[in-house]
Image (cartoon, grey):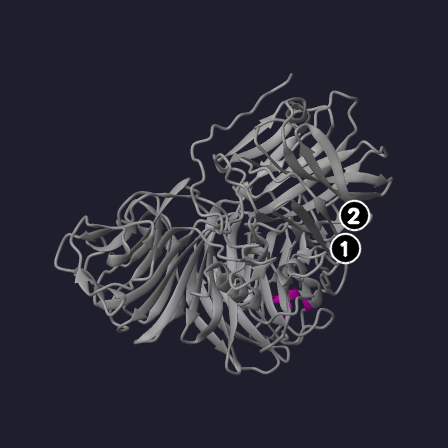
Amino acid sequence: MKKLITILILLFASVAWAAYEREDFDDPVWVETDLTGVIAIDGNKITATNFDRNIDGYVTRNMGAGFITDFVHTVDVNVTAMVNDGNSSLWAWAISNANDDINDIAGDSGDAISVIASHATSTNYKVQLYSLDSGTPAIVDSSAHISVGTKTYWAISRTGTTGTVEIYSTASLRITGGAGDIDTIGGTVVGTAFRYVYGIASRNNGLAGKDISGTVENLYLQGPGLSGVTLMGVAVNPLRYDLKALWTAANQTFTNAQVLDTVAEGVQDGSLTVVDTSTGTVKVVSNELELVGDGSWDTTGVYITNSTSRRLGKGLFAVVNKGATNTFAPALLWLNNAGIDASNDGEATIYFRNTADIQAGTGVDFAQRAEVGSYSASTEYSLLILIGGYDSNGIPFKTGDTVGDFLYGASMMIRGGAFSGWTLLWKVLTLNTTSLFGALVQNSGTDLLDNILILTEVLNVDTMFQPNFLDTFVGTNDDQLVSNHTPEVVAGATGTGNPWESGSTTWTIQTNAASNDPSLGAEQATGNLTAGIWYVITATEVDTFFTGCAIGDYFLAFATTGLDANNKVQALTTSEIHASDDMGISEGIFDANLIVAADNPQAGLVIASDSAANPQNYVVAYYDQVDAHVKVAKVVAGSPTSLIDVAAAYSASAQLRVIAYESGSNLKVRVYYNGTVIGTEQTISDVGIVSNTRHGIMSVDSSNSVDNFTVMKRTDANWDTEISRSTEGIY
């Protein structure tokens, strides 16, 4: 059945044409007409599947009468499949004066310009510049042939009646400028001032369909969206803000409920509402916002007056100069209601406690919060909370995923003090309220804030959210060897090969999770235990191996306990217990969901291991069903030392998280179970462990399962570059 999808135009563009912005095709300024259901929109990307020359399928934006004169547009285009026919073509970009297909415009003696990806050979397409002048069409120029499946990066310009298309093989070459490395096409085009720009156009000449499929994405009206760049003679100024408050204003004190929306009040874009209902103060002092708290979390602060839409990669930024380490706040928050009260409205926060530690969290009154770092007094910190990153099942986003499916959760980041570059402190997986309010709240003490930003444009999601390693263990069948399985992401790229390594072939995939059935050695009834080896008890007297021990219990031996006819064990092989990969990073956030069976085995994570075949130096964090504790141990030259042993209520499929980072010559380790910090941060100085880059999972019994193993980098120079780019160098 034919279906017409029409999104009403709610807003006409009124910005100066020099403004650069990546277009969001989900924005209501864009109108989608799709009579046959061949178009799919996901944020800044349009996917056309089996697009034909005999359909109406186009996405347009009304810029206003006569608005489009001389211009530079950039867009990324890929033809992914096509029939072997000379009439197969993807009308990937266009401008016109009618919200219609190109054939109808020609029939009305209208004008238009389009750039088309057209069939060249059975395996190649070509880029063509098309001009329609008073209903008369012309192919102005055609490019060299390009292989189907190759994404190309176009810079389309018109000056007077001269049209040019530079075709590049990478976005970075386009930004650099100069002639397209693939080709340059151009010539005389119609000089009409146009009203409509197309994210994708269609011809609809009524002839037999000639299927073609492809993508059109990252359309910038005037340029590539990078500050400090001149592209084809046009200076770039990329950004739009939901909020931009730089506080370059005269000293002044604000009052409760005052709306700040002028440069004179320190706000360049958007607006903030003041909350000052008690004895605290909110004021501008020396081009910074000073917050003085009164000991309450809901009486002093500011929040954005109008909500902002939830989008993957939308960021809330602020600079905080923390006055002292014995005061609460400030807190940077995403809330789901207007105001600063987090008691019922918390989505995500990062804040400074009065014990010199930094906490991050989510939920009602941020009940699900954890200590994630420490800070120093009189030190400037830049904070960022990025929206989204997980789907409804807690699976992290990876490159190529549908952006709109990954709006759950948030990432908390910091820079400043000991954090020399942007550092990922914490990630939460839950909550996905559609409309959000950014806020800053002061509880006690006096602190200074600056450069409060919410970008309308999201940060590059591939850069900011791509895991370093991701395996959800979706197997081809049960019993598939993990060592023969390809994870979704390896070394930050789409998974290839089989990186998992273990001492044997005991790790398999069972019901889309990793399961291990390590072999057991012969029963031992004489001699002594070997410290650092895992055992299962086959006979025991009271409390021989540990308090409350029983037959069938598994345990890691820390002592060389004697064995006899009444106290017997079977040994496991450490290399079989572990499955790991050399990931090339020594720092990160390591997550896995655990099911640990009630018959008293253990499962968890292995961090900083020195070997897959014969691990002698590593850190192991695991849930122990024997006593319902989360435990952490380091093993150095095969000898174990207990670091953490803390009771924690078991929850099936709960996440075990380890955060590991280097500080000087030490490795710092924090452990969390089901969102709660376990024990205290551990400092490991053993050279056999520090800087190791092999990490993975562990389990001692086939009744356990390990799932959704995810590794996120803690720092990445690409984050710094992307954040600086997206904020015009403010951050």
Q: Nearer the viewer, residue 266 or 649?
A: 266
Asked whether residue 189 appears in the rendered view, the answer is yes
Residue 431 image position (x, y, % from top left): 43, 44
Magenta range = 564-574
User: In this rendering, is residue 441 above or below 319?
Assistant: above
Query: Which residue is situated farthest in the left direction here?
Result: 279
**Amino acid at pointer 2:** Ser
Residue 712 image position (x, y, % from top left): 56, 61
Left or right? Give the position of 631 relative to 253. Answer: right
Task: Determine the residue positioned at 68% across, 41% down.
Answer: 189
Q: Nearer the viewer, residue 67 or 426?
A: 67
**Amino acid at pointer 1:** Ile
Residue identified by numbered label 2:
143
User: In this rendering, is residue 295 above or below 203?
Assistant: below
Mark 2 or mark 1, whichever is nearer to me: 2
- Quadrant in the picture for residue 331: bottom left
Please check the rendered image and state whether residue 108 is part of the magenta-colored stretch, yes or no.
Answer: no
Residue identified by numbered label 1:
182
Asked whether residue 650 appears in the rendered view, the answer is no
Q: Nearer the viewer, residue 321 or 699?
A: 321
